[in-house]
Image (spheres, rainbow, N blue to C red):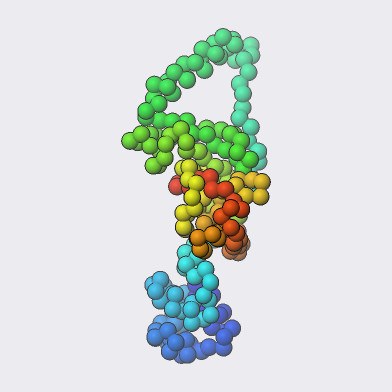
Amino acid sequence: MSRMGDTIRQNRLKYKLTEKQLAKKTGLAESFIKEVESGRRIPSDDQVKRLLKACGITESMSTEIDTFNAVEEKPRPRPRPYIIPVEKPSEASGKSEKQAEQDAESSAAWLDALGGVVKRVPITDEKGIVIDHMLFPVVGGKIEGGTPDKVTLFRVPDDSLSGFRVHAGDLLLCVPEKTPVDDAFMLVHYGGKRLVRRIKKLDPSHLMLQSYDRELRIDSMLWGEITILARCVKLIRTL
């Protein structure tokens, strides 16, 4: 049985509806509903909305549809703190301090020469500390639509978004944005730390922040209670 079919069946039974009664309420065939509940048929978004509404599910309907067919993945372990290694000159390496400085200057010169082609983008943690860098191509003077000097990478600290297939240790490319974008994953500052949440606009003064670990969690708050930092435009996963 599929996750979608299981949800529909459970709520149908909760409201003491038979397949025939549900079919009558939705205008769908009874045989079709049986096949959906058994996982043999996949309904369209419109059919899903009608079935969910008839079964009493009216809140966060778009999120339910988005996540029904998501592949369940085992939670990843929380990443260990990463410290950028600093190579110290030693007799064993055969490099003197002067040679190391020359190598660093040479590397910096190459990056300057390629400044219009690639850019070192900083990787930050939930405290805003730069923990590493990654090279990105610059296309048309932009990186994924953002100014190269402004884009950053955010390392996801936990599995609070695993239901959206974003796991601990994944990197999210962030483009600066100060206003909330509906249905977008955005980097925000809230509760003394930086985190990523899916944004839903409720009205001109209220926002809904969604996270999804083992179950969907929704936090409703005023715009002034959080600071919007950036919009997440790309997911990077290291295998």
Q: Which percent across, then down, holds residue 48?
A: 44, 74
Q: Which percent across, then down, holds residue 118?
A: 40, 30
Towards the viewer: 195 or 40: 195
Residue depicted at x 39% and y 86%: 27
Q: Which percent across, then down, holds residue 91?
A: 63, 11
Could you tell me if residue 142 is visible in this image? Answer: yes
Give the side of residue 71 with respect to residue 157, left or right.
Answer: left
* Depicted 23 relative to depicted 103: above or below: below
Towards the viewer: 79 or 223: 223
Residue depicted at x 45% and y 46%: 234
Could you tell me if residue 235 is visible in this image? Answer: no
* Depicted 172 relative to depicted 46: above or below: above
Q: Hey, which quadrant is residue 160 in on the image?
A: bottom right
Towards the viewer: 182 or 57: 182
Towards the viewer: 143 or 22: 143
Residue depicted at x 46% and y 90%: 20
Q: Which percent across, then down, holds residue 198?
A: 52, 56
